[in-house]
Amino acid sequence: MLNLERALNQDRLLRALTGLNRNAFDALLPSFEQAYEASRIAAKPVRKRARGGGRKARLQSIEAKLFYILFYFKCYPTFDLAGFLFDLDRSQTHEWMHELQPVLEAALGHEMVLPERKLRSIEAFLEMFPGVERVMIDGTERPIQRPQNSEAQTQNYSGKKRRHTRKHLAVVDQSKRVLVLSHAREGKLHDKRFETEEEIAFHIPDKIPIEVDLGFQGLQSEYTNIRIPHKKLRGGKLSEQQKQENRSLSQSRVVCENAFAGIKRYGAVSAIYRNRIKDFDDHLMLTAAGLWNFYLKAA
């Protein structure tokens, strides 16, 4: 099994394996332990032997369990590789991952760092996100294996990425925190149509500027607080002032790209999706966004 003590005692190594340094790892541990105990109570297994009997688990300590699920998110190993590294059978690595992922998600929820899945009202936005000065709305895609079904192939083929993908729409604030993360949708879906269906801008106060890219062209005619780049007309030119305004907006919006880059440090949401459970990719992205928010909170 991997030398857990060595990893925990070297910040650089721990960040490479889990995405968190030692301080952040220790800060998350109590919530993870609480969520794990709650999941065990909720499961209520029927005992066939006295407590303590049977074969001892390889991932005995709560630190080992948290390390394992964070390692899975960061490195996204195959179950064969994870079994080799942690001295487990591949079926056990699969079971541990699906048991611990909801626990990690619940722990991040307890830390209040999970993004909201949908905005309900302007009042709710102001209550949940006080101090937000401006927001950016943008889509992010992750590659998937080509679906076997021809209709699913068409729906999930992204012309922008030129591959099969699944897409999320996210709202990021000026501090790179992900405030809202939509449920995963087909990669073919256009950003503007996605936003219209989710009604994100509709539930953001008018006093808060919303910065978007040209993928949301037309949104500025619906809301007064939209900041969007100037689009060059066919055969025309942008003025120097318009070019400067576009550069300024691009520099302002870069924090959104930084947030996406922070989330996609985790291989489980940046590599080609391999898992077979339907919509499990959505839970992976939500948990990875929560880990990014937790990283910002603990920094």
Image (cartoon, grey):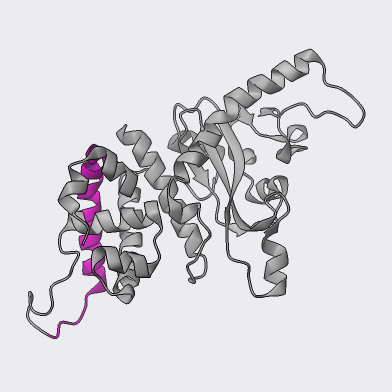
Residue 138: x, y in percent?
A: 61, 40
220, above or below 275, in the image = above
Mark count: 0
Residue 175: x, y in percent?
A: 46, 29
- Judging depth in this view, the residue of 257 and 42 nearest the camera is 257
Q: Is residue 272 magenta?
A: no
Picture quarter with the C terminus? top left
Residue 25: x, y in percent?
A: 25, 44
Q: Tell me the residue at 25%/64% (across/down).
A: 86
93, above or below 180, in the image = below
- Judging depth in this view, the residue of 92 and 89 nearest the camera is 89
Q: Is residue 95 left or right of residue 287?
A: left
Q: Tell me the residue at 38%/51% (across/down).
A: 74
State which region is magenta: 20-48
Q: Is residue 274 left or right of residue 241?
A: left
51, above or below 154, in the image = below
Quarter-wise, where is residue 99 in the image? Answer: bottom left
Q: Is residue 138 left or right of residue 79?
A: right
Q: Residue furthest top?
A: 241
